[in-house]
């Protein structure tokens, strides 16, 4: 790459956000990890992200400071992996429409700041499997509204709809997530055995490293601009990769 890209990661302290920061930094992008200014663990994050070669930016979730910081950074890519859960909203004392306020509200805020930049960045939004226009449930409805905010922003975008994201690196246990992943993995195995490989690749649980790989791969690929990607396109090995060139012989392979 002639000029390394600059990536801003919102939600960098989350399970997925961290993996994304590491993946981006490892691939040579200037990576800026956003941390809440009141985070009790900001010292720890600084140490971890410094070690990975990423920068840390503590910034309030307000339009003006966000816009000023983004104007200075001039990001080529903005990743949004923000999301709350009932448990963390309870700990923070949030009440009422928590997904509307956090998942949709903060995404919209970030999108709005990006649209005011002189050079609009590519906006990579992490939504969720199952998000549809008439989704039932507060979580998926907020996801749809956030997707719509991204889609109608005029920014180049990529929306990802991952399945359950689980793995050993999570700070909290989340037993329901693990049970859900086991069920989806069992169904996917059956689907795979019956030849439904795309179904299996869409519903099988993923972990933060695989998803971070898939997101970064998609974010730096022009074929994924202004597209919504389901999980089969966010794996280490995607259905599309298998359709790419396969050498017919050793001699062909040597030519590439
Ligand atoms: N987990 C799954 O199975 C799954 C499946 C599909 C899609 N998703 C979506 O994928 C994304 C990443 O998931 P994840 O499991 O990595 O999430 P996570 O570990 O819970 O991280 C969430 C991130 O959002 C931030 N955040 C939460 N509430 C906030 C608030 N009120 N104000 C500002 N920041 C706030 C957190 O910051 P702090 O660290 O400061 O709290 C953290 O950086 C989320 O949007 C999630 O909804 C998750």
Image: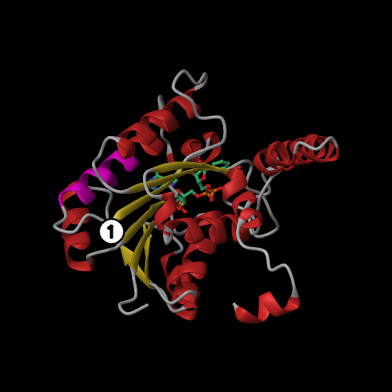
Residues rendered magenta in the picture: 106-116
Rendered image coloring scheme: secondary structure
**Residue, disc 1:** 59
- Given residues 112 and 160, the one toward you in this image is 160
| Side of 107 where 45 appears, left or right | right
Res 188 → quadrant: top right
On the image, the x and y values in percent for residue 2 come to 32, 80
- Residue in the picture at 49% in, 77% down: 52
Q: In this view, does 106 lie to the left or right of 26?
A: left
Q: Which residue is drawn at 22% across and 43% down?
A: 112
- Does residue 171 show up? no
Q: Can residue 82 be seen in this view?
A: yes
| Vertical order, 62 against 219 (above or below) | above
Number of callouts:
1
The quadrant in which residue 176 appears is top right
Q: Is residue 65 left or right of residue 27?
A: left
Above-or-below relation of 200 to 252: above
Say few, some or many: other residues with alpha carbon within 10 Å of mark 1 (under 14 / 14 to 19 / 20 or more): some
In the image, is 143 to the left or to the right of 166? left
> Looking at the figure, which quarter contains the C terminus?
bottom right
In the rendered image, residue 10, in percent from the top left (x then y), is placed at: 38, 54
Q: Is mark 1 within 8 Å of ligand 1?
A: no
């Amino acid at each position: 790459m002639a000029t390394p890209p600059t990536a801003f990661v919102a939600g960098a302290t989350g399970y997925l956000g961290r993996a994304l920061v590491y993946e981006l930094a490892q691939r040579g992008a200037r990576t800026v990890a956003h941390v809440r200014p009141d985070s009790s663990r900001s010292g720890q994050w600084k140490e971890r992200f410094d070690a990975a070669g990423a920068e840390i930016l503590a910034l309030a979730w307000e339009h003006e400071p966000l816009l000023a910081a983004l104007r200075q950074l001039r990001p080529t890519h903005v990743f949004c992996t923000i999301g709350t859960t009932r448990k963390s909203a309870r700990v923070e004392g949030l009440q009422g429409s928590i997904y509307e306020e956090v998942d949709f509200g903060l995404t919209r805020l970030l999108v709005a700041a990006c649209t005011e930049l002189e050079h609009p960045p590519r906006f990579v939004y992490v939504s969720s499997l199952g998000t549809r226009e008439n989704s039932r449930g507060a979580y998926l409805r907020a996801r749809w509204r956030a997707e719509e905010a991204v889609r109608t922003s005029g920014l180049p975008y990529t929306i990802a709809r991952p399945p359950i994201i689980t793995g050993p690196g999570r700070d909290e246990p989340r037993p329901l997530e693990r049970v859900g992943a086991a069920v989806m993995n069992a169904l996917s195995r059956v689907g795979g055995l019956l030849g439904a490989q795309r179904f299996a690749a869409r519903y099988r649980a993923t972990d933060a490293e695989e998803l971070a790989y898939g997101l970064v791969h998609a974010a730096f690929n022009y074929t994924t601009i202004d597209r919504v990607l389901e999980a089969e396109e966010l794996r280490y090995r995607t259905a599309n990769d298998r359709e790419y060139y396969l050498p017919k012989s050793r001699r062909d392979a040597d030519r590439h």
